[in-house]
Image (cartoon, rainbow, N blue to C red):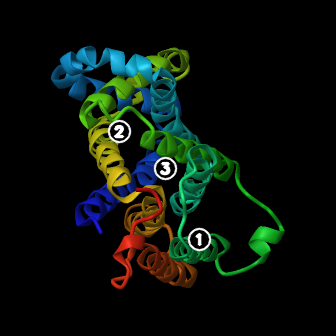
Amino acid sequence: MSKTGYLFAFGAIFLWSWNVIISRYLAPYVPPFQISFFRWLIASIALLPFFAVKVWKARRAFVSNWWVFLILSFGLAFMNNFIYQAGHSTSAVDMSLLATMGPIFLVIFSWLFFKKSISKRQVLGFFVSFLGVMIVISNGTLSTFTEFQFAKGNLWMVVFALSFGLYGALEIKRSHAIEQFTYLAATVFLGTLMLVPFFLETLEAHPLSNIGLVQWGMIIYLGICNSIFAYLAWNIALAKLGSLRCGLIYYSLPIFSSIWAYYVLHESIGYAEFVGALFVFAGIFIGSVKRKSNSSKMLDAAS
């Protein structure tokens, strides 16, 4: 078991858990494409001065695996925009819970496109964690699903989850001849360029003068902490732990986000959230802990 992998995975989750909180706060002030553009522009400015030369030297490796590079750049730039869209019409707690659908699609895409195997223990842990998420989403009542009454923001979060799953699966198949930070810098820069036309379209209705210092501070946090440190940590975790174990750990995201939502946005946390959290962490434990008696079968999911 890679302790370093778990450290990186939970570190990324902690940083990402603030994403929905900031999204909800910025919703009345900054349109989604402006948040996305400045987030990745800040990340580009921070990364490229240190890695521009390395990116240029690795250009042949990028070209040889160009389709993965292009999709990862697109996904990195646009998938969080779906979160910022959702921030206008659903709660931070619901956003974080629906984001945990991402690992489901991550495992599906990993199996569908790259034939990654899944152990029985990991499937059980995955199911237990997913059950915990369902308890929280339904608030402990079945009618929430039978009536199928979802807000528009929740649908945006489903699109985000699909994007996240595809990004995670393709990240495993990217060119590992290129160092992590170098690859991240290149995808961030290309993703920022992809966002330019969408950003320019927002300026007439939403001039930048409307953005205050507090809002700029939050966008800078997204650009540095969420866009660089969190993604780098997550990519390292994927390489060390594999897609399924990272998927299980990702289920802890709503636990952190719900805590921040309670204290910062004054959103309520009830009995269902508490019970759901127990299932989430139980699933992480079941799917992540190895059997001591048979080391040859350990870590079979996505190594």
Amino acid at circle 2: Gln
Q: Quadrant of residue 231?
A: top left
Looking at this view, name the residue that lies furthest to the right: 147
Task: From the top left corner, tell me how far across and down residue 2 is, in percent.
Answer: 27, 64
> Which one is nearer the viewer's eye here, 169 or 41?
169
**Residue position for label 2:** 215
Q: Eyeballing the image, is 287 above or below 15?
A: below
Q: Residue at x 56, y 55 (%)?
A: 107
Which structural element holds mark 1?
Answer: helix
Residue 264 position in % (x across, y down): 38, 62
The CA span between labels 1 and 2 is: 34 Å
Badge 3 amino acid: Arg
Q: Which mark is residue 24?
A: 3
Sequence-first disc among 2 and 3: 3
Quadrant of residue 65 within the rendered picture? top left
**Residue 228, picture quadrant:** top left
The answer to whether residue 247 is above or below residue 195 is: below
The residue that appears at 46% across and 31% down in the rendered structure is 77
Q: Is residue 77 left or right of residue 230?
A: right
Position of 266 with respect to 152 (left or right) is left
Considering depth in this image, is 294 or 146 the residue closer to the camera? 294
Q: Say the numbered circle drawn on residue 64.
A: none
